Amino acid sequence: MPVDRRPLAIFLMGPTASGKTALACALSEQFPLDLISVDSALVYRGLDIGAAKPDAATRARYPHALIDIRDPAQPYSAADFSADAQAAMRRSSDAGRIPLLVGGTGLYFRALQRGLSSLPEADAEVRAQLAEEASVIGWDGMHRRLAELDPAAATRIKSADTQRIQRALEVIALTGLPLSAQQQGGRGQPFPWRVLKLALLPEDRAPLHARIAQRFDDMLRHGLLDEVRALRQRGDLAADLPAIRAVGYRQAWEHLDGLYDAAELRDRGIFATRQLAKRQITWLRSELDARVLDPERGGLQQRATEALRLFLGSN
């Protein structure tokens, strides 16, 4: 059997508030690791408190690539991440070190390792036409149209997710093919790194839910609303931008719009974060080649260390 000579990499994945960052920092004390963030909110400058971004002291001691690389007014795609992450991984491998990618954005991990299908670029004219049609029949009507044209995509996309509905219909208009069929494509070549996947998956979610509630309360106490006020005062940001749609930021933005009071903001923020964690856990369970570590069991760092030693020692 031929020897696999690809450089090594670690994926440390888990739901929000599962302790990924602390574990990644601890592991980097023991192994020659370069930390690379895999988080769709941490890429944005100015999203600090609500994104649970590692503080300046932590990042000074444990540098993370791909944090604070975009202005909130600029969209950042999975394709952008894949290109940036591979560049950071190459720099790490070329230096004789091991990239450790840590985060919970499943789409980014999938795009990096498996590739993305070649979908058409956005077309302003088609989008304008779809928006005009939506103003007549509503986005529920547009979702029903999508269900007729691409049932698989309509099942995945909620009727309230106007951006994804528009994109799915745009792809059909431009290519004549369902979005779901085109998304079956991907990377044609093996991933350039051999990867150990560690998935932090709690068997009992109650402690995770308690941490989520505590962390959101801490965010509010430490100035989440002031952070969002500062973003609003810029004047060039809107609620439909990906940065502002991030969990916590959307709810704070809507609260400042007067849609609900502070008590409901807290309830909605905690609920949205729990729903995010649920989606992340569902994704992680589909990663059948990952080594599962229960973060609620004692000795998490020791178990992760043993997994890394076995992986690195076999090469």
Image: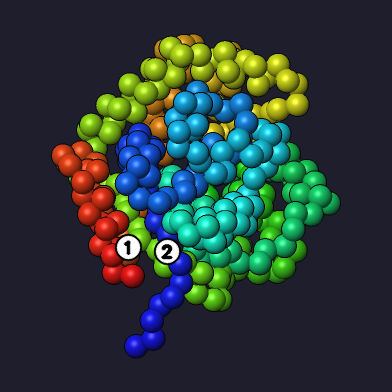
Q: Position of residue 172 (x, y in %)?
A: 68, 63
Q: Quarter of the image for the C terminus: give it.
A: bottom left
Along the line of sight, the residue nearer the viewer: 244 or 26: 26
In space, the residues marked 2 and 1 are separated at their CA atoms by 8 Å
- Pointer 2 with pointer 1, Cβ within 8 A: yes
Q: Residue 230 lies in what quarter of the image? A: top right
Q: Is residue 135 left or right of residue 145?
A: right
Along the line of sight, the residue nearer the viewer: 198 or 135: 198
Residue in view at x 57 percent, y 13 percent? 226
Along the line of sight, the residue nearer the viewer: 280 or 114: 114
Along the line of sight, the residue nearer the viewer: 167 or 112: 112
Residue in view at x 39 percent, y 86 percent? 2
Alpha-carbon neighbours of circle 2 within 10 Å: few (<14), some, or many (≥20)? some
Badge number at residue 8: 2
Residue in view at x 51 percent, y 26 percent? 56
Residue in view at x 24 percent, y 38 percent? 205
Question: At label 2, which amino acid type do we have?
Answer: Leu
Q: Quarter of the image for the N terminus: give it.
A: bottom left
Question: At label 1, which amino acid type do we have?
Answer: Leu
Q: Is residue 32 left or right of residue 122?
A: left
Can I make out residue 201 in this image? yes
Q: Label 1 belongs to which residue?
A: 312
Q: Position of residue 275 (x, y in %)?
A: 39, 37
